[in-house]
Image (cartoon, helix red, strand yellow):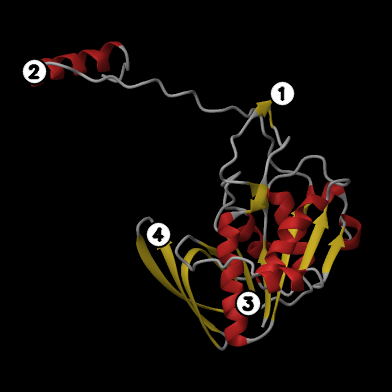
Amino acid sequence: MNIFVLMKRTFDTEEKIVINNGQVSEDGAEFIINPYDEYAIEEAIQVRDKHGGEITVVTVGNEDAEKELRTALAMGCDKAVLINVEDDVEESDQYTTAKILAEYLKDKNPDLILAGNVAIDGGSGQVGPRVAELLGIPYVTTITKLDIDGGKVMVVRDVEGDEEIIETSLPLLVTAQQGLNEPRYPSLPGIMKAKKKPLEELELDDLDLEEDDVEAKTKTIEIFLPPKKESGKILQGELADQVKELVSLLHTEAKVI
């Protein structure tokens, strides 16, 4: 089975976001594999181990992403591909990323493509579905279970606290939701093996793409942090007095009534 995982390098979930000159500052920040992509990687490994085949993990970014790709290889992926756009793309969005990934995948004959449901930095959840649309293959998002029997696939999908069971077929793209599995940690032997596994680096020219071909369709107007939460108030006195004070505060301060 020819399996691909779409991976993104994101801020560590413990990082404190700092805005400088209208941009998110990366100075001194720690980066990790997008946590939802870890579910995709783990599921890809389990599918390969059960059905055979090969896993290629792919990311669009710059040379800094090599660290996260090596981590994916240490977890158990077979090959890695970095599509380095640092010198070719000034502004990008989900369309840019999806167009580049689809162009890379179009002649690779993928049986199964896995991605994270969302990236914890942007949270749009668009890249996976966009790639599937560009490739002309079916896709199912936010999956929590995946069973493959030959060319047939049964998927359980998370839908706002309930489940939806979908039957489809390969080739297929799915996006992983929390609960799909428990991602493994890279083992020491895995880390050592990862150093010898192939990591290919490509640029737009290698995909016969120009910057105009992947021009962003959206533009970020402003980036800002949410306002700081004010400290709460504890109401004192008899219950009836507390209710009166609460109503007054909601009217005069919160201005919601």
Question: What's the amino acid at mark 4?
Answer: Val
Q: How many marks?
A: 4
Residue 167: percent from the left, percent from the top? 46, 77
Name which quarter of the figure residue 245 lies in: top left
Q: Which residue is mark 2?
A: 238
Mark 1 secondary-structure assignment: loop
Name which quarter of the figure residue 247 lies in: top left
Q: Which residue is mark 3?
A: 171
Marks 3/2: CA–CA distance: 66 Å
Q: Which residue is mark 1?
A: 21
Q: Which residue is mark 4?
A: 159
Query: Can you tell which of label 2 and label 1 is closer to the viewer?
Result: 2
Marks 2/1: CA–CA distance: 50 Å
Q: Give the left or right position of residue 149, taking residue 79 as reference.
A: left
Residue 156: percent from the left, percent from the top? 43, 71
- The residue drawn where x is 56% and y is 53% is 118
Precedes in sequence: disc 3 or disc 4: 4
Label ID, residue 100: none
Precedes in sequence: disc 2 or disc 1: 1
Question: What's the amino acid at mark 3?
Answer: Pro
Residue 29 in view of the camera:
yes
Precedes in sequence: disc 1 or disc 3: 1
For the C terminus, the quadrant is top left
- The residue drawn where x is 84% and y is 66% is 200
Mark 4 secondary-structure assignment: strand
Marks 1/4: CA–CA distance: 39 Å
- The residue drawn where x is 57% and y is 47% is 120
Question: What's the amino acid at mark 2?
Answer: Glu
Query: Can you tell which of label 4 and label 2 is closer to the viewer?
Result: 2
